[in-house]
Image: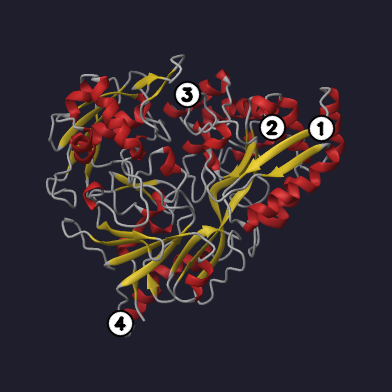
């Protein structure tokens, strides 16, 4: 990946120059362009996962950790500490900073952690409208790790909590739990829901009260441009929301009640990707860009320093495994005709030379392991060169052998996106001779759950339906996105053997022991083809000249992971 070192070095540029007389004119506001729409404050909800909330709010809603540029969680002691307590079951003692308060003055307490666990655990459910099945009350995007927690010992309003995991379910990546953008203000949910004691309701299993809380948690923090009731959106970090409009985007300003180091720049303007972004960049409104490469037609970052890099997210076709796509032969034939190698050559490394190994080195052949993992070659080797793509004869043979005639597949994605539109067209052109008709079902209001609801047959997104920045070095997103019952398993893939592998690795990720199970699981996935991995998602990451402390983050947190340290001097 070229230019990554250049981007990283921007962090030191003006800092070093300060001694020699760097300009004393400090810019009071920095514009930050992100991929997805900004539709909710709640990044952990399904709506939030399909938006840019994780990139917009990591320094507005803090946690005990945040995702660093190396794809691993970094402890955030501003909120407090988390330490393992010896015992048979994994037990974590959390201590919240006595000074920690929300921007409305309400103390941050273990009540907020209780709400986080209740929403993420998946244990609270209700009957579906037809009364046939039980469905989760909370519309959460991921239950990974939280579902392994047995209980949280918390006294209402207390500044400490003890989190106890189920016996034998010692979640290996527990430091990612209760992280940035996970912990929402429980006092707001309790007030609006009319529940006086949220801890008692959760600990006592009061389903009536929990349902009221869930109803607010699911939609009560949604954001619409215009006048906001700011009492619903208190912040726990160095920034708070000031306003949100179509013209200016999301305006974050310094949180006056923040107890840590004051943000270096008092105002951050978060601008969602749109067809107007090109003008905003050229006019100088935007000083930081972090979007999917090639998504904006004619975008020229101009005087911004940086370029395109491979990220930890993976562009892939996620397929429905029911309905019209229920037969694996159809999905297999699509994988055979999809020109994966050519797609990588044409769209996988725009403007930069592919790495020799690791992230961005070529077509991605594993759904379960990051390309820079030591065990990637063994696991990815199960593909066995069977799906290089563009193999019309093989696709026809697969369809003929299953006595399947013409196939029509609708592929969705969020528009406008020049690059993804071109990828869908390239797949359509390559697969048409194989009697597979690809329909471009991209739309500006696209949501990944359209696949779950059988409104489309496949979607071109990142891991688990992410529309922008995504992925981590731990690979948690990859593992859980295909597990039965996982909220991000939009294609409804169901494989008990894979579930066992995911559950096992969640508690024992030892690489030496993981090679065998992961290799077997990847082999099953290449037989069932619930997804067709393409390549590491290329991202455009660029910073204004003179912007110090800016460090590219090619994972879920995006480059705004440390926005409170940004300083722009001109």
The residue beneath circle 4 is 25
Instruction: Using the image, tell me which numbered label, if any, was put on residue 160.
Output: none
Circle 1 packing at 10 Å, graded few (<14), some (14-19), many (20+), is few
Which label's residue is closer to the chain start, 1 or 3? 1
Circle 3 packing at 10 Å, graded few (<14), some (14-19), many (20+), is some
Q: Quadrant of the C terminus?
A: bottom left
Which label's residue is closer to the chain start, 4 or 3? 4
Residue 524 as seen in the image, left or right of residue 144: right
Mark 4 residue element = loop
Instruction: Using the image, tell me which numbered label, if any, was put on residue 504.
Output: 3
Is residue 170 in view? no
Instruction: Using the image, tell me which numbered label, if any, was put on residue 382.
Output: 2
Task: Tell me, yes or no, whether the two marked residues, 4 and 3, touch with CB atoms within 8 Å.
Answer: no
Q: Does 28 sit above or below residue 252?
A: below
Mark 3 residue element = helix
Q: Residue 223: image x %, image y %?
A: 36, 50
Q: Does 320 sit above or below residue 104?
A: above
Between the residue at mark 4 and the residue at mark 3, the CA separation in whole angstroms equals 54 Å
Which label's residue is closer to the chain start, 2 or 4? 4
Mark 1 residue element = loop
Between the residue at mark 1 and the residue at mark 4, the CA separation in whole angstroms equals 65 Å
Residue 249 as seen in the image, left or right of residue 493: left
Label total for image: 4
The residue beneath circle 1 is 406
Between the residue at mark 2 and the residue at mark 4, the CA separation in whole angstroms equals 57 Å
Foreground disc of the pair 4, 3: 4
Foreground disc of the pair 2, 4: 4
């Amino acid at each position: 990946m070229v230019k990554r070192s250049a981007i990283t070095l921007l962090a030191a540029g003006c800092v070093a120059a300060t001694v020699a007389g760097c300009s004393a004119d400090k810019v009071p506001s920095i514009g930050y362009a992100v991929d997805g729409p900004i539709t909710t404050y709640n990044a952990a909800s399904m709506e939030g996962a399909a938006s840019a909330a994780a990139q917009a709010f990591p320094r507005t809603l803090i946690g005990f950790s945040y995702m660093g540029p190396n794809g691993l969680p970094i402890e955030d002691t501003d909120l407090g500490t988390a330490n393992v307590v010896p015992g048979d079951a994994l037990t974590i003692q959390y201590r919240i900073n006595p000074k920690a308060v929300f921007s409305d003055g309400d103390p941050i307490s273990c009540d907020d952690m209780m709400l986080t666990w209740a929403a993420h655990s998946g244990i609270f459910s209700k009957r579906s409208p037809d009364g046939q099945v039980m469905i989760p009350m909370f519309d959460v995007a991921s239950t990974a790790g939280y579902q392994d927690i047995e209980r949280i010992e918390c006294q209402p309003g207390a500044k400490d909590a003890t989190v106890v995991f189920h016996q034998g379910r010692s979640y290996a990546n527990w430091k990612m739990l209760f992280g940035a953008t996970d912990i929402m203000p429980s006092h707001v949910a309790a007030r609006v829901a009319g529940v006086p004691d949220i801890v008692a309701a959760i600990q006592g299993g009061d389903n009536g009260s929990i349902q009221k809380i869930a109803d607010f948690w699911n939609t009560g923090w949604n954001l619409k441009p215009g006048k906001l009731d700011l009492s619903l959106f208190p912040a726990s970090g160095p920034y708070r929301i000031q306003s949100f409009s179509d013209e200016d985007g999301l305006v974050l300003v310094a949180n006056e009640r923040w107890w840590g180091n004051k943000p270096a720049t008092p105002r951050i303007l978060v601008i969602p990707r749109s067809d107007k972004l090109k003008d905003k960049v050229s006019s100088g409104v935007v000083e930081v860009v972090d979007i999917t490469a090639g998504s904006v037609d004619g975008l020229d970052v101009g005087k911004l320093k940086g370029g395109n890099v491979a990220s930890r997210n993976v562009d892939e076709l996620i397929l429905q495994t029911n309905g019209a796509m229920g037969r694996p032969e159809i999905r297999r034939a699509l994988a055979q005709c999809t020109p994966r190698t050519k797609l990588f050559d044409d769209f996988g490394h725009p403007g930069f030379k592919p790495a020799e190994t690791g992230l961005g080195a070529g077509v991605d052949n594993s759904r379960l392991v990051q390309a820079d993992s030591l065990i990637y070659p063994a696991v990815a080797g199960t593909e066995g060169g069977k799906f290089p793509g563009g193999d019309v004869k093989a696709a026809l043979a697969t369809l003929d052998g299953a006595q399947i005639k013409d196939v029509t597949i609708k592929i969705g994605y969020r528009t406008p996106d020049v690059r993804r539109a071109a990828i869908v067209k390239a797949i359509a052109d390559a697969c048409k001779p194989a009697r597979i008709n690809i329909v471009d079902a991209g739309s500006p209001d696209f949501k990944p759950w359209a696949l779950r609801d059988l409104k489309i047959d496949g979607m071109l997104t990142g891991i688990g339906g992410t529309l922008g920045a995504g992925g981590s070095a731990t690979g948690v997103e990859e593992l859980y996105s295909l597990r039965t019952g996982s909220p991000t398993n939009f294609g409804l893939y169901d494989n008990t053997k894979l579930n066992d592998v995911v559950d096992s690795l969640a508690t024992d990720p030892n690489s030496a022991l993981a090679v065998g199970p992961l290799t077997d699981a990847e082999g099953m996935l290449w037989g069932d083809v619930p997804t067709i991995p393409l390549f590491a998602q290329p991202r455009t990451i660029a910073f204004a000249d003179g912007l110090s402390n800016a460090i590219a983050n090619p994972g879920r947190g995006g480059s705004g992971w440390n926005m409170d340290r940004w300083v722009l001097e001109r």
